[in-house]
Amino acid sequence: MPGPSGTGAVTRSTLRQQIADALRDEVLAGRLQPGQEFTVKEIAEQYGVSATPVREALVDLSAQGLLDADHHRGFRVHEYSVDDFRGMIEARSMVTDGMFLALAADLPEPGDPRIAAALAGVRRRGEEAQRAAAAGDLTVLIGYDLRYWRELAALFGNPYLSDFLHRLRVQSWVCTVQHLRRLSDLRGTLWSGHTELVDALARRDVPGARALVDAYNTHSLTLIEQLTGDFAEGLTEGLADG
């Protein structure tokens, strides 16, 4: 007796992922702001689809820490604090530090064509990310930066670690993008050491790779602390003037 067809389930699963990806991009683009609320019905109407894949997509994003679920009001975009960002940086550092050590130990000789091709692909993503950073194009930078780190982590050979690091990096961008988009010109502000990091790993220079990531983390945290501090100070002054 033949089993039931899985076509409908596959279609719904694909739609669920497409909606989740689209909403994640809306958050990263700043079109969905932290604390903004919406319902399953509103999103379903926006995308012209049924409620079921939308609800599943929103539950997925909630599990990833990007949304908060309120059974009575729907969903809202999660609001991250500077302390949250510090925790993300610490977690990212622990993951990348172990990953760099393992990669340096396991990488074949630099001339090995397999590893050379893999590193060349990651480096190309890094070059695109650096161009976007230099131009101050945050949206393009985020896209290439996420692909860069995902492909770099894939060299480690552990898909669970790669997925975990990717989730951390998405959360990091969601946390910082709301502040970065307040700046009118981001040229020269965003980290752009992607190719240097790949080159350091290709040389098996773990201390050099660590130093680059440490500098990146310090730069990012200092920038966000300044932006949130300036914003809070300006808000306080505005209230006092009023």
Image (cartoon, rainbow, N blue to C red):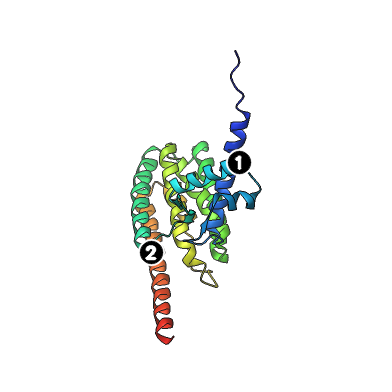
Q: Please identify the residue farthest to the right as the structure is shown.
A: 48
Q: Residue at x 51, y 69 (%)?
A: 188
Q: Please identify the residue farthest to the front as the structure is shown.
A: 72
Q: Quadrant of the N terminus?
A: top right
Residue corresponding to mark 2: 221
Q: Nearer the viewer, residue 177 or 107?
A: 177
| In the image: residue 198, left or right of residue 127 | left
Q: Secondary structure at mark 1?
A: helix
| In the image: residue 225, left or right of residue 57 | left
Which quadrant would residue 83 be assigned to in this image?
bottom left
Q: Nearer the viewer, residue 53 or 70?
A: 70
Residue corresponding to mark 1: 15
Q: Position of residue 169 (x, y in %)?
A: 45, 52
Q: Amino acid at mark 1?
A: Leu
Q: Secondary structure at mark 2?
A: helix
Q: Amino acid at mark 2?
A: Leu
Asked if residue 108 can be seen in this view, the reply is no
Q: Position of residue 205 (x, y in %)?
A: 38, 49
Q: Please tell me which of labels 2 and 1 falls first in the chain.
A: 1
| In the image: residue 193, left or right of residue 101 | right
Q: CA distance from mark 2 to mark 1?
A: 36 Å
Asked if residue 85 can be seen in this view, the reply is yes
Q: Position of residue 53 (x, y in %)?
A: 57, 41
Q: Nearer the viewer, residue 163 or 73?
A: 73
Which quadrant would residue 241 be assigned to in this image?
bottom left
For label 1, count other residues whose C-alpha is less than 10 Å away and answer few (under 14), some (14-19) or many (20+). Answer: some
Q: Residue at x 38, y 44 (%)?
A: 99
Q: Please identify the residue farthest to the bottom as the structure is shown.
A: 241
